[in-house]
Image: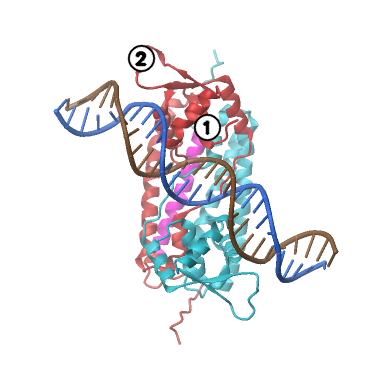
Chain colours: A cyan, B red, C blue, D brown
Amino acid sequence: MSRTQTTYVILGILAIHPHQSGYEIRKTIQQSVGFFWGESFGQIYPTLKRLAAEKLIVPSSSGPSARSNRQEFSITPAGHDCLQQWLTLPYRDDPPRNEFLLKLFFARDAAPGVAIAHVRRFQESNRQILATLEYLEPLARAHNSANPGFPYWMLTLSLGVVQLRACLEWSQSTLAMLSEPAPAIPETNLITKNTP
Amino acid sequence: MSRTQTTYVILGILAIHPHQSGYEIRKTIQQSVGFFWGESFGQIYPTLKRLAAEKLIVPSSSGPSARSNRQEFSITPAGHDCLQQWLTLPYRDDPPRNEFLLKLFFARDAAPGVAIAHVRRFQESNRQILATLEYLEPLARAHNSANPGFPYWMLTLSLGVVQLRACLEWSQSTLAMLSEPAPAIPETNLITKNTP
DNA sequence: ACACACATGTAATTGGTTACATGATTTC
DNA sequence: GAAATCATGTAACCAATTACATGTGTGT
């Protein structure tokens, strides 16, 4: 009966790939769901303890090659039940908070270049993430395509890709618009206060 | 020297439209930046008090028509300075957390219909938001196109629209894929464990 | 008279990050 | 033997939500 989201990420990751330590779990998260999910150590380690206490995971060892100074875990049948139960529940969509859009919305209260700077950073950041995803995709395909979870992994990836592409197209046209001498809005003739 | 994000939403909203009460501010937020930002009363009222104490806003009245049982506020020059300063700072992009994608990623651990149900809800929710935005847009254009902030408002709106459209296209093709008898992934031949 | 929207606020709780502290192992 | 990375953990803090508590004005 544990309810933090961290719980389920850990269970899900261990369901895919057992015998991982807290440190490894975090790495796996970054490399698999990293573009839409993040976890900090301050969250992972306490959760691992709690999950072990609840018997949803157990300390385990990946054979004689296991290193001494780390503790690996695997998911138990109870843990798997817990994961499945959570999966069937409706996902919660928390109220979105996008500080980039917020600053853009208020941008007329800032100096002229500010909006452009934000959009450029947005563009650059999206470009980078997209590049990472497009680099990762063929690798994932080559290594994991036989895994029964693979189709779902690709779906998340493809949503990421189409969203990023949409953001990049928007960035481009927005930068073009913001760079114009007089900010022109389609189908609108702005009348400034200074015009007599 | 106040730092919560709530601070700046309130300042920004009051910069656009002064003489608003906490209750009204929340409504305005929902109607303008609602699709990418949310605020709760538990956050708004304490923040208003703090901002007033810091002289970034002042209690004000919108003339004799003001109602008795509510307190309106307006932004001060100091508040405007504070807002401007924040606007020039780089936006922070908090680690994204998308529970929908998380459940989809782990969906192979769930019963067959689960993924489809989630995607359908995702589609439905996006459709609804898109409909709202597309309904709002011409209204905003008609009422506020002369406002100097208007071009920026439209930019946030248009990003919302293109993102939502991308999500809807993805939803459609995803549902088609998930509804196929054998989940087929392009360029991949799945080999199940049961095949001898 | 009743219901509903308007309106303000507080307290408890949550879910999480950040910074700190510590030590082992590998690599150069 | 120094530096980097691997590895685990705790304490302090934070932003924000939720639920609760209360009262007013308006429309039917």
Mark 1: few/some/many CA within 10 Å (<14, 14-19, 20+):
many
- Please give the range of residues in magenta: B148-177
Relative to residue A166, is residue B104 depicted above or below?
below
Q: Amino acid at mark 2?
A: Ser
Q: Is residue B186 left or right of residue A120?
A: left
Residue positioned 63% across, 53% down in the render: A128
Chain letter for mark 2, please. B
Q: Position of residue A1 (x, y in %)?
A: 39, 61
Is residue B96 something one can see in this rendering?
no
Per the rendering, the mark at residue B65 is: 2
Q: Position of residue A163 (x, y in %)?
A: 51, 52
Q: Nearer the viewer, residue A139 or B63?
A: B63
Q: Is residue A87 magenta?
A: no
Pointer 1: what residue? B7
Count of marks placed on residues? 2
Q: Is residue B151 magenta?
A: yes
Looking at marks 1 and 2 on the same chain, the residue that comes earlier in the sequence is marked by: 1
Helix, strand or loop for disc 1: helix
